Image (cartoon, helix red, strand yellow):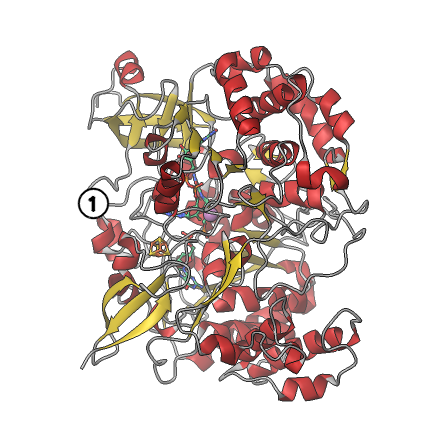
Amino acid sequence: MSRTAPRICPLCEATCGLTLTIGDRGEVTAARGDRDDVFSRGYICPKGVSFGQVDSDPDRLPGPLLRRPGTPPGRPAAPAGWDEAFGAVSAALRPLIERHGPDAVGVVLGNPNVHTVAGALYPPVLLRTLGTRNLFTASTVDQMPKHVSCGLLFGDPLAIPVPDLDRTDHLLLIGANPLASNGSLCTAPDFPGRLRALRRRGGRLTVVDPRRTRTARLADRHVAIRPGTDALLLAALVQVLFAEDLVRPGPSAAHLTGLDTLRTALAGYTPEAVAPACEVTPEEIRAMARELAAAPAAAVYGRVGASTVEFGTLTNWLVDVANVLTGNLDRPGGAMFPLSATAPAPRPAGPGKGFALGRWRSRAGGHPEVKGEFPLAALAEEIDTPGEDRIRALIVIGANPVLSAPDGDRLDRALAGLEFMVSVDPYLNETSRHAHVVLPPPPPSRSPHFDFALNALAVRNQVRYTRPAVPPEPGRPAESEILARLVLCAGGTPDAGPETVDATVTDGLLRKAAADPHSPVHGRNPADLAARLTGQDGAERRLDAMLRLGPYGDGFGARPDGLSLRRVLDHPHGIDLGPLTPRLPEVLRTRSGRIELCPEPVMRDLERLRRSRDRRPDGLVLVGRRHLRSNNSWLHNVPALRGGTNRCTLQIHPRDAARLGLADGAAARVEGAGGQLRVPVEITDAVRPGVVSLPHGWGHDRPGTRLTVAAAEPGVNVNQLLDGTLRDPLAGTAVLNAFPVRVGPLPAS
Ligand SMILES: Nc1nc2c(c(=O)[nH]1)N[C@H]1C(S)=C(S)[C@@H](COP(=O)(O)OP(=O)(O)OC[C@H]3O[C@@H](n4cnc5c(=O)[nH]c(N)nc54)[C@H](O)[C@@H]3O)O[C@H]1N2
Ligand SMILES: Nc1nc2c(c(=O)[nH]1)N[C@H]1C(S)=C(S)[C@@H](COP(=O)(O)OP(=O)(O)OC[C@H]3O[C@@H](n4cnc5c(=O)[nH]c(N)nc54)[C@H](O)[C@@H]3O)O[C@H]1N2
Ligand code: SF4
Ligand SMILES: [Mo]
């Protein structure tokens, strides 16, 4: 007898509610969109449809792998029991820390941590326990510029405004392709449908992208900009707002500082001055500024193509500067701050601690920390640069930096030289093949789901939680338990129960709340509060505590109709918490208590932008692309998601192909600062002249992995074209888009 169970999809940021069909043996036989889901209303994409294949991939590791002492290098790790595996972690970590100090252990966190309960709850505890400063995450190959610009503007790197998609009249979308990605830093199930609805209600969509993407094809206006020049374009757009007296800050007006400084700083960025670099006409830039200013409500939104570029932080800063100046920040239909159910309850407005950059530096490269992290592109050098205080051991959780970060070959060699490495990963892949211990989490059907991170970026406030759709396999720990046990290993108490980790965190949270005069539980006894928590494990009790103390919470009885875990469990399709609401000035945490339009680090970086204004296009630049049936590096092993147009090809404009003597389907040589690749050519006018495009996450041809399907058609690793030295200096984020390459036919052999 089959049955159905709800499960929020963990495969992208859209967080669609799915209905899984589950067979006798606990296998997922089908997945469809949950029509009753309060947020996704039945939407599903081809990745969600393939949930069963993703979940039951025979290459998923059934249990730990361990490289026992004496195993020759290059020989794969062998199956081991869970206790033996954790024993090996514990035996390796503590002595290393005692001998060489906490920074000898590095931590690498990848993208899937924003899609798991465990990834939200345990890495912060692990880092505190280790006390290491060597943290590297996917943020520095992704959205760190947004954290930095929001940190500087609003005082909180997590205060990220999202376009109020369902109510806007005008969306200016820069370097994002939600028809393939389903959206990012803007959680919106059925993003494509929401864009179509915008057009239907008479709104306008402008897309700035060097490729004519599926999203661009939906737009009223497509601006095929020269890659890497969006900061110049936006600076000119803002200059036009000032010059044509279109600045109307609206809701932000009472909370601004730096407006006059901004006007002066950007005065030289006239449309005429930037047009040659952007290869966009001055008329078009003026029209974009006027349309933005004229719309009753509008939002500017930039994503990966606006972030992993040379001026990523400046671009992201200008995105929100444009939102502020047109009165769209914090306005319904503009760019608004979501308020998730597990956020700390809002506090009275007032000055905060602000956001500081570069509080410490990395050992080998001297890179400034950003949000407590060093650039992922600098991981290899922190391992392979000799020195007593180098990174000797690595804890890698859900990350595949050998493919996702620049110069995978160097990182590959560095990982091979580590004294110890543990990977928490379902696969033996390009990165985890170096681990001495691999700890595989259960598949998604057997894991719970709650969007701690993504609900804070959602276009509608709502809350949903799904318990594992299929009971855990006996003897196999949940990912939460795996990470809790890693915390215990790191702290030197490997034999304590994993639930003690949660109890300690919960205790701290409740004590803090009880001592906080603004909390609904002020003055209450933390032990009494703890005794009232419900949940079937430590992770659930932590979720209960966060929900009850959060902005919609029941305050442990203070607001009887408020949220708790029990209440959320009673609503398997979620609880709608309403449209986004204005949050100024309460969100602001700058030292001035205001929106600081001209933060000093940004002002200094403008000099670099000014110099780029006079650069003239010269040679080809490479940009990335995503495919709807792919997800970074780890879905190429799922047969249903392969094939068709989902291929690792070099897209090039017909004019460039003719000039270079490249034929469609033939192999080309692509060369960058970090190396060269040989890749099939795909001639298409969907990329503009001067630009070539390669997707990332491919290159599954290294030995010692277990990716049977992916290895059969491995593709090439685009990030091998990079040497890791190109970064946005403010955010430490790697330049993965708009970097120079040389392309030519393969020499006849
Ligand atoms: N050239 C170029 N490079 C890029 C990008 C680009 O656009 N162009 N995009 C960048 C971006 S935006 C990102 S976010 C990064 C992503 O970079 P990474 O996070 O390093 O890569 P992913 O491929 O997302 O997968 C990480 C790992 O998580 C594992 N995994 C899957 N599910 C789970 C799970 O439930 N638990 C655990 N513990 N592990 C799991 C997978 O097997 C895989 O090994 O790549 C970046 N790299
Ligand atoms: N199907 C699928 N969905 C995904 C992922 C995936 O790999 N596959 N990855 C997930 C992750 S981790 C993330 S972060 C999101 C990313 O979500 P998006 O940012 O929407 O993803 P991309 O498709 O990379 O879109 C970036 C766009 O920027 C354009 N671009 C490149 N350089 C420039 C430039 O200099 N200027 C401008 N204006 N545009 C430029 C590219 O042509 C591309 O169309 O997607 C998520 N969803
Ligand atoms: S859009 Fe994203 S969340 Fe929705 S079904 Fe597809 S992969 Fe899953
Ligand atoms: Mo990402």
Give the tally of numbered discs: 1
Front residue of 472/161: it is 161
Please tell me which residue is depicted at 36% across the width and 26% down the height of the picture: 692
- Residue 477 in the image: x percent, y percent? 43, 78
- Residue 50 in the image: x percent, y percent? 25, 59
Q: Is residue 653 left or right of residue 589?
A: left
Quadrant (top left, top right, bottom left, bottom right) of the C terminus: top left
Observer able to see residue 268: yes
- Position above or below: 230 against 707: above
- Residue 455 in the image: x percent, y percent? 51, 59
Q: Is residue 323 left or right of residue 398?
A: right
Observer able to see residue 368: no
- Residue 250 in the image: x percent, y percent? 67, 37
Q: Residues within 10 Å of mark 1 (few under 14, many from 20)?
A: few
Specify the amino acid type for callout 1.
Answer: Gly
Q: Which residue is mark 1?
A: 643
- Position above or below: 697 against 531: above
Front residue of 99/334: it is 334
Please tell me which residue is depicted at 80% across the width and 71% down the height of the picture: 517
Give the SS element for disc 1: loop
Quadrant (top left, top right, bottom left, bottom right) of the N terminus: bottom left
Please tell me which residue is depicted at 25% across the width and 15% down the height of the picture: 661
Front residue of 546/47: it is 546
